[in-house]
Amino acid sequence: MEERPIIVISAIRFFQGGTIVIVNECLWFLSRNYSTQYKILALVYDKSLFDNIPAIEWIEFPKARKSVLRRLYYEYFYLKKRSLIWKPILWLSLQDSTPNIKAAIRVAYYHNPLLLKPAGLHLWKFQPRLSALWLLYKFVYTKGMNRNDYIITQQQHVAQFLAVKYVNQKEKLWVFPPKSFLVKNSFVQKEPSVLAIAPDSNPPFTFIFPATAFHYKNYELLLAACEILNMNGLDYRLLLTVDGSENKYIKNLVGKWSKRLPQVKFLGFLNRSDLFDYYLKADCMVYPSLLESWGLPLTEFSNLEKPIICADLPYGRESLAGYTKVRYFDPENPEILAAYMTSAIKGQLNFNPGQFKLSWQHIDDWEACFELLLSKVQ
């Protein structure tokens, strides 16, 4: 029996957040549509982080989280040897970098926004490890990008950045907005879960900001806005998906603000099912982040047709294109944010959705994605 050609999906650096969602969606599509024709290898840190997807051969790298040097070793040395054995027809790296491998078609999916903003003094002060990661992106992960046959980004402004800084052939760059499948698949039937906040028969107006534990998420501005709401005696609640256990920066943040702002609930990391429960309980999403490759929570929450107060930055304009219940604000001005949050509490928030046009060559869904990637070998 002739061996099926191999497709490799590489994601060994991922362990939480929206990246897990992207990998799941990609592998589900391949399982349902390509697994009889191709052998699908998924390279991951821990397969238990992902759905139990049939017809996928999982290859785990349990030591990948131990050190950066080990991850670099996998990407640039170890996987080269494996690729020579596997001889894959397609190698799709979902984790930004271009690994040193051999494959008929090589593709890098670039999603991390860190490279778009220089690591300033504030980042070096509050999260030096994140600053070190910025250096990796700038001087390591971007190397060899032009060796790819295709480079996929989630947003147009990221593709434009890469075209100017790193990619010689613009035609290699494609934009694949995840909105096409995330809205459709976000809310699913499930058993109710036990939430980390007590039920309330008459809850206050509830804001939610689901974000990871990074300085560029702009927590300080949001909490400063909340302090203004407190000074004005407003009744509200803010749900955050950090709790201080993540890193020193967030620990200091929680220590500073938890007693000053009892209205803020530091929930910690939530699995996707529980997060959707909180979406249903929230009245409004507030999203002050300074950097995003897409803004996955914006896409998920917009499916509920509830108000969103979002930083007026390119990622927000693109992620929420066509959504009418959004108010954009200056992400450096806590007074303006507090004013819009006050309007939301009072039911008087005015929206300013604006217009966005995707002019870059783009991919609409996973079917179109793999048709494009495999078109050179079929």
Image (cartoon, helix red, strand yellow):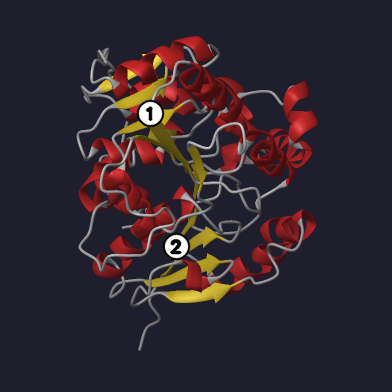
The quarter holding residue 320 reads top left
CA gap, disc 1 and disc 2: 58 Å
**Residue 124 vertical placement versus 227 (above, below):** below
Residue 74, compared with residue 119, is above or below; it is below
Q: Nearer the viewer, residue 344 or 109?
A: 344
Q: Amino acid at mark 2?
A: Ile
- Image coords of residue 182 (percent x, y): 29, 47
State which quarter of the image contains the N terminus. Answer: bottom left
Report the residue marked by disc 2.
Answer: 89
Q: Residues within 10 Å of mark 2 (few under 14, many from 20)?
A: some
- What SS does tag 1 mark? loop
Q: Position of residue 190 (x, y in %)?
A: 24, 66
- Where is the C terminus found, in terms of image quarters? bottom left
> Which is more toward the observer, 194 or 155?
194
Q: Is residue 144 above or below residue 40?
A: above
- Taking 258 as reference, is 273 left or right? left
Residue 336 percent location from the top left of the image: 45, 10
Residue at the image position 56 percent from the left and 44 percent from the top: 96
Q: Residue at x 27, y 27 (%)?
A: 307
| Residue displayed at 25% across by 69% down | 191
Q: Which residue is labeled 1 in the image?
A: 235
Image-based side of 35 in relation to 171, left or right = left
From the image, state whether disc 1 or disc 2 is nearer to you.
1
Q: Quadrant of residue 172?
A: top left
**Count of number-bearing discs:** 2
Q: Is residue 114 left or right of residue 317?
A: right
Task: Please tell me whether residue 109 is drawn above or below residue 168 in the rendered image.
Answer: below
Residue at point 34% right, 59% down? 273
Amino acid of disc 1: Asp
Q: Is residue 333 visible?
A: yes
